[in-house]
Amino acid sequence: MASAYRRLMTFAPLTARRQPAAAPGGRLIRRVPVWVWRALMAQVGPAERIRFNLDPITTVDYATDLDYAADGIREHRLDVMAPHGEHGPLPVYVYFHGGGWTSGDKSALTKYCASQAAGGMVVVNANYRKATAVGMPQMIEDADSVLAWVRDNIADHGGDPGSIVIGGDSAGGQIAALYTAVVTRRELAAYYGVTPAIAPSSLRGLVQHCSAADLSVLFERGFILSLGFLRMLLPHRARAAASTRSGLRRAARFLSPIEWVSPAHPPTLVTTSERDYFYRSSLNFAERLRANGVRVDSLVYESSRRNTVHTWQQNARFPESQEVYAALRRFVMSVASPEPAATG
């Protein structure tokens, strides 16, 4: 993912890298269509799965490719990682990989997830169906199925089903944040036709790495991704009304987690960088959360930290990634057993 980002950013001047949503005074960043993104990810995906997982962590127990939907397809598989010799119950961290909603796989995040498990939690690394075949309603359905599996089975792996943090990077961060809103906002749950598998009191926190939590940035002048990414995510019933730019903006409200923030939202950890094209999205989301009285922990890097391109957190060899991991462990442990929040 980070390699694909480096290629995309060759379109942009430094001013756009510092303010990725728009490039005042600079030339426009080319709006990358969905098919170009998919082609880039097809090239870098296999190499990243190998590179990110060098020197595997041996202090955790691995249960891989568990079928959370009992239908036999890879998109409905998850891995569980738990500290070796720990009997729990431990906090549970559920993770959704990125990939522009069209690509990516949990296998690239194995070492990232194992790193968190080694820090004293049970980690679930989940796949989900892609927007090449389905829309956001089905992705939310998959997220809910993952949480239903966690609710019913995670105790067998030493996890506490009443103490869950969910997270993700990039598109996976958007899915994690939107599912959080489904759990805490009844109107959004009704829109997606979901009765959440877990209660708000069990969802103790949200982690956002370079997340697409504010999709309004795609409408800004010069943003790197095309509006086709939004159109492909919409439910079929919403696509006719989204044929115009203004109609798409209205429809995108149901895709954009920032629109559903309330005081009932759980504490959130945000990590981003000025080198991330979703930098402004992350800052906007953190600001909206704080405006609603929600605790926000953040780790924001300046552009001088050259390792911190989009979703650098996946690569454990970077010192900046290790800093994020330490912050994440502190966050998860601090929210693991708070007083339950009220439903909004």
Image (cartoon, rainbow, N blue to C red):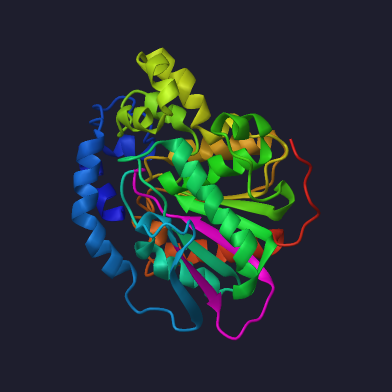
Q: Along the line of sight, which residue is nearer the eye, 110 or 217?
A: 110
Q: Quadrant of residue 31?
A: top left
For residue 99: magenta? yes
Q: Is residue 110 above or below residue 243?
A: below
Q: Does residue 234 sit above or below 336 in this rendering?
A: above
Residue 104 percent coordinates (x, y) = 33, 53
What percent of the width, then of the height, locates residue 62?
47, 77
| Residue 344, quarter of picture | top right
Q: Which residues are magenta?
A: 78-101
Residue in the picture at 40% in, 36% down: 135
Would you say 290 lies left or right of 226 here?
right
Q: Magenta includes 80?
A: yes
Residue at position x 69%, y 73% from top? 89
Foreground pick, 94 / 71 = 71
Residue at the extreme front of the image, as rendered: 71
**Residue sticking out furthest to the right:** 339
| Residue 185 in view of the camera | yes
Observer-nearest of 178 and 148: 148
What residue is rendered at 66% in x and 51% in y?
A: 198
Please state the total of marks drawn on the protein image: 0
Is 108 positioned to the left or the right of 148 in the image?
A: left
Q: In this view of the protein, can residue 174 be seen by the observer?
A: no
Q: Position of residue 287 (x, y in %)?
A: 60, 36
From the top left corner, tell me how far across and down residue 88 is, in percent: 68, 76
For residue 198, side relative to residue 18 (left or right): right
